[in-house]
Image (cartoon, helix red, strand yellow):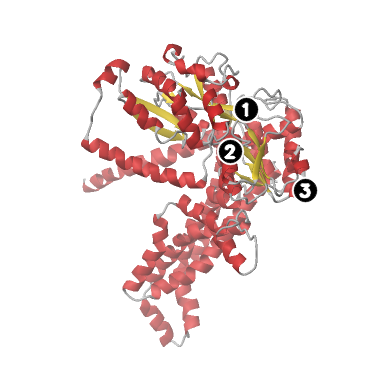
C-alpha cells in the first residue's frame, strides 16, 4: 500500500482541485464520445479505484488516447476504506487492493475472473509475485507493485555491527530517541513475531502475547516516535537514524539522502503485493481487462515505477531500473528480495486483527 | 389554523434531527450494549463492552489524559482569549470589524492543512529550530511533545473562545459602566463587578465550544504528538477503522458522550449564578 509524504499530500489536494475544475470545464464544453470504443467494449468509460499517487502522470491520458475512452479515477487512503465502499455497492471496473484484501474479497465472492486471452502482457510478470496463496493461479488478480518491510538507517551514525541484529536494534538503548517506528498494528506485530521466530500469521494467543511483551519492552527501552507517512520526509532530511519503512518508500528515501541505507532483516519480513482486480459488479469488464493488460506493458510499468518508486511487477522493468545507470542502480531498497524462506505473505484474520489492534493501542499508551 | 401552519414548518427540522441525531445515537446505543453475534437475527445484549473498558487501566489512563489536555487547552484559551476579546470589543468602529476578520481569516484554511504547517514549524530543522540554532541552541525539536499538542489545540480552538466572549462583551450596555463609575467604582472594581459577571455566559459557551472538540479530537494529537500520543479519539478511531470492533468503539463513544453531558451540566451551573444576582 502506497504511503504518501506530506509534500505529496499537499500536491494531491492541489491536483484534486485542478481535476475538479477540469471536470467542470469538460462537462461544459464537450461531451464527445468515441463510438468505435463504445461498440467494441460496450461502453467508453472506465472507472478506476486505486491508492493515491499510484500512477505516472501519463498512464491514464495515454490509455485514454490510445483506446479512445474516458477514465474516471478515484483514490482511497486504505484497503479498509476501499472495502467499505465496494461492499456498499459502489461500482468500479478496476481496483488495486493489497494481497490480504484480495483474499477477503475472494472469500466473499466479490471478484470476477480475468479474461487471460486479453492479457498477453501477463507473461512479463516476475516469478516472485505470481501464484501466491491469496490467488494461487492468478485467475483473479494481476500484480501491480510489490515490496517488503525493513529498516532504513543512517550509515554514518549507526554501527554496521549493530544493524546486524536486525529488528533487535529496536531494543538497543544506544539508539534511544533516535528511532522511528511505523504506526501500524499489522507491521508492528509482524516484526515482533518475526524477532521471536514465530509466523506473522500465527493465531496462537501465547505467541501474540509474547510479541506484545516484546513491543512493550521496545517502547520502554528506546522510546521510538510512532509515525506513518511523515517518515519519508523526515528520514530524507536525516532527522533520526533508524526507521521501519516500506521498501518502496525506502527507495525514495535512499535516492534523496545518500547517507541512508536499507536492510530487510534476516529474521524475515512481510512480502506484500498490490494487484489489479475486477469486481463482480463492474459495468465494463471488457475494457477493464484491456486496461490491466495495458498497465502491465513495459512502457506503462516503467513510467509508473519511475514516478512512484515502488518495485514493478514487470521483470524487464525491474532489470532496467536496477542495472547500471538505472534510476535505482545502487539502491538497496528498490528490488525486494525474492525466495527468502522466512518472508511471508500476510493473511487476514478477523479475530487476530481485533486482538492486535487493541494490544497495539496499549503499547502506545503505555 | 395559523399556528398549525407554522408548526408544519418545523417538520423538516424535526425530520433532520431524527435522521441525523436520534437514529445515529440509537445505533451507537444498540452497538454499545450488544456483543458481536454469529448471525444478524439474534441480538445479544450485554454490558461486556463497558466492563472491558472500566477494568482496563490503560483505557482509564487514556481518558484521564484526554480530559487533562482538553482542560489545559480550555484554560489557556480563556487566559489568552479573554483579553483579546476585551480589546476587540473596546476597539472603535471599523477597527473591531477588521480585528474580527483577521481573527477568523486563518479558519478559512482547512484545519488539517494548518496542523501540517505546524509540523513544519516545530520539527527539527524547521522554522523554530532554525531560530533556536541562530541563538546557539542546536537540534531543538518541539514536535511530538505535550507542548506541541496543546499549542495545536489552542491554535485551532482559540477563535471560538474569543468570538463567544466578544459577543457577550459587545452587547453589554455601556451605561452600566458609567453608572458604576458614578457610584465611585474604580476601573478594576467596575470590571470585576460589572463587566466580568455579564461576560460569563460568553465564557461558558466558549468553554463548551473548546472543551468538547478538544476532548474528542484525534488528528491534532496524532500529527503533533506522534502515534504514541493516544487520546480517546484515537482509540475510537482505531476501533472503527482498523480493529473493526464497532461494539467496543460505540461503548467508548457513549462513555465519552456521558462525560461530555456531565461537564456541560457542570458549566451550566456556573452560568446560572450571575442571573441569580439580577
Q: Are marks 3 and 2 in contact (CB under 8 Å)?
A: no
Residue B273 visible in the shown view: yes
Q: Are marks 1 and 2 in contact (CB under 8 Å)?
A: no
Q: In 3D space, how far apart are the residues under numbered discs 1 and 2 (Cα atoms)? A: 15 Å
Give x and y (percent) for residue B66: 60, 52
Q: Which residue is mark 2?
A: A251
Answer above or below: position of B213 versus A363.
Answer: below
Residue A345: image quadrant is: top right
- Element type at mark 3: helix
Which residue appears at 66% of the width and 22% of the height? A339
**Towards the viewer: A204 or B236:** A204
Which residue appears at 45% of the width and 15% of the height? A120
Give x and y (percent) for residue B123: 58, 56
- Element type at mark 1: loop
Answer above or below: position of A205 versus A138.
Answer: below
N-term mark: 1 or 2: 2
N-term mark: 3 or 2: 3
**Towards the viewer: B133 or B15:** B133
Which residue appears at 21% of the width and 48% of the height? B2
Q: Which residue is mark 3?
A: A173
Q: Which mark is residue B227?
A: none
Chain letter of mark 3 equals A
How many other residues sit within 10 Å of disc 2, few (<14), some (14-19) or many (≥20)? many
Q: Which residue is mark 1?
A: A271
Which residue appears at 41% of the width and 64% of the height? B103
Answer above or below: position of B94 versus B156.
Answer: below
N-term mark: 3 or 1: 3
Residue A217 visible in the shown view: no
**Towards the viewer: B223 or B94:** B223
Amino acid at each position: 500500500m502506497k504511503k504518501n509524504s506530506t509534500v505529496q499530500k499537499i500536491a494531491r489536494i492541489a491536483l484534486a482541485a485542478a481535476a475538479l475544475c477540469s471536470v467542470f470545464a469538460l462537462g461544459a464544453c464537450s461531451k464527445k464520445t468515441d463510438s468505435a470504443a463504445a461498440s467494441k467494449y460496450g461502453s467508453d468509460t472506465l472507472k478506476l479505484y486505486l491508492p493515491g499517487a499510484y500512477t505516472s502522470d501519463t498512464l491514464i491520458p495515454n490509455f485514454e488516447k490510445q483506446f479512445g475512452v474516458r477514465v474516471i479515477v478515484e483514490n482511497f487512503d486504505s484497503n479498509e476504506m476501499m472495502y467499505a465502499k465496494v461492499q456498499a455497492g459502489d461500482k468500479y471496473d478496476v481496483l488495486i487492493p493489497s494481497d490480504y484484501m484480495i483474499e477477503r474479497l475472494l472469500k466473499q465472492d466479490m471478484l470476477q475472473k480475468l479474461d487471460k486471452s486479453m492479457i498477453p502482457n501477463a507473461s512479463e510478470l516476475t516469478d516472485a509475485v505470481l501464484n501466491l496463496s491469496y490467488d494461487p493461479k492468478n485467475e483473479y488478480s494481476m500484480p501491480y507493485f510489490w515490496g517488503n518491510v525493513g529498516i532504513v538507517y543512517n550509515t554514518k551514525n549507526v554501527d554496521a555491527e549493530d544493524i546486524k541484529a536486525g529488528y533487535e536494534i529496536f531494543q538497543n538503548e544506544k539508539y534511544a530517541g533516535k528511532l522511528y517506528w511505523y504506526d501500524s498494528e499489522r507491521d508492528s506485530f509482524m516484526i515482533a513475531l518475526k524477532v521471536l521466530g514465530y509466523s506473522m500469521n500465527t493465531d496462537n494467543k501465547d505467541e501474540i502475547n509474547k510479541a506484545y511483551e516484546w513491543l512493550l519492552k521496545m517502547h520502554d527501552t528506546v522510546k521510538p516516535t510512532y509515525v506513518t507517512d511523515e517518515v519519508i520526509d523526515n528520514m530524507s532530511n536525516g532527522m533520526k537514524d533508524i526507521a521501519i519503512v516500506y521498501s518502496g518508500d525506502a527507495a525514495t528515501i535512499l535516492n534523496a539522502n545518500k547517507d541512508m541505507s536499507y536492510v530487510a532483516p534476516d529474521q524475515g519480513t512481510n512480502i506484500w503485493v498490490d494487484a489489479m482486480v475486477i469486481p463482480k459488479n463492474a459495468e465494463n469488464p471488457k475494457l477493464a481487462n484491456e486496461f490491466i493488460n495495458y498497465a502491465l506493458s513495459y512502457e506503462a510499468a516503467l513510467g509508473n515505477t519511475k514516478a512512484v518508486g515502488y518495485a514493478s511487477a514487470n521483470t524487464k522493468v525491474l532489470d532496467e531500473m536496477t542495472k547500471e545507470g538505472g534510476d535505482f542502480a545502487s539502491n538497496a531498497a528498490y528490488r525486494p528480495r525474492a525466495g527468502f524462506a522466512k518472508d511471508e505473505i500476510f493473511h487476514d484474520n478477523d479475530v487476530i486483527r481485533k486482538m492486535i489492534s487493541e494490544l497495539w493501542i496499549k503499547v502506545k499508551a503505555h | 389554523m395559523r399556528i398549525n401552519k407554522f408548526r408544519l414548518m418545523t417538520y423538516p427540522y424535526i425530520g433532520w434531527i431524527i435522521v441525523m441525531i436520534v437514529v445515529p445515537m440509537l445505533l451507537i446505543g444498540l452497538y454499545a450494549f450488544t456483543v458481536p453475534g454469529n448471525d444478524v437475527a439474534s441480538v445479544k445484549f450485554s454490558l461486556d463492552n463497558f466492563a472491558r473498558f472500566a477494568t482496563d487501566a490503560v483505557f482509564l489512563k487514556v481518558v484521564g489524559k484526554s480530559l487533562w489536555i482538553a482542560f489545559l487547552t480550555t484554560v489557556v484559551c480563556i487566559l489568552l482569549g479573554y483579553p483579546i476579546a476585551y480589546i476587540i470589543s473596546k476597539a472603535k468602529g471599523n477597527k473591531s470589524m477588521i480585528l474580527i476578520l483577521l481573527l477568523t481569516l486563518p479558519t478559512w484554511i482547512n484545519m488539517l492543512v494548518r496542523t501540517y504547517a505546524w509540523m513544519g514549524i516545530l520539527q527539527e530543522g524547521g522554522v523554530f529550530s532554525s531560530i533556536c540554532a541562530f541563538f546557539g541552541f542546536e537540534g531543538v525539536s518541539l514536535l511530538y511533545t505535550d507542548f506541541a499538542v496543546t499549542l495545536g489545540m489552542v491554535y485551532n480552538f482559540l477563535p471560538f473562545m474569543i468570538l463567544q466572549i466578544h459577543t457577550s462583551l459587545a452587547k453589554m450596555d455601556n451605561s452600566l459602566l458609567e453608572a458604576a463609575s458614578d457610584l465611585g467604582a474604580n476601573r478594576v472594581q467596575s470590571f470585576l463587578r460589572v463587566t466580568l459577571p455579564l461576560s460569563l455566559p460568553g465564557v461558558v459557551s466558549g468553554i463548551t465550544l473548546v472543551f468538547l472538540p478538544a476532548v474528542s479530537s484525534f488528528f491534532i494529537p496524532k500529527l503533533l504528538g506522534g502515534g504514541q500520543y493516544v487520546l480517546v479519539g484515537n482509540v475510537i478511531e482505531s476501533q472503527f477503522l482498523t480493529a473493526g470492533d464497532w461494539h467496543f468503539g460505540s461503548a467508548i463513544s457513549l462513555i465519552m458522550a456521558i462525560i461530555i453531558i456531565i461537564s456541560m451540566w457542570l458549566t451550566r451551573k456556573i452560568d446560572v449564578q450571575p442571573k441569580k444576582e439580577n
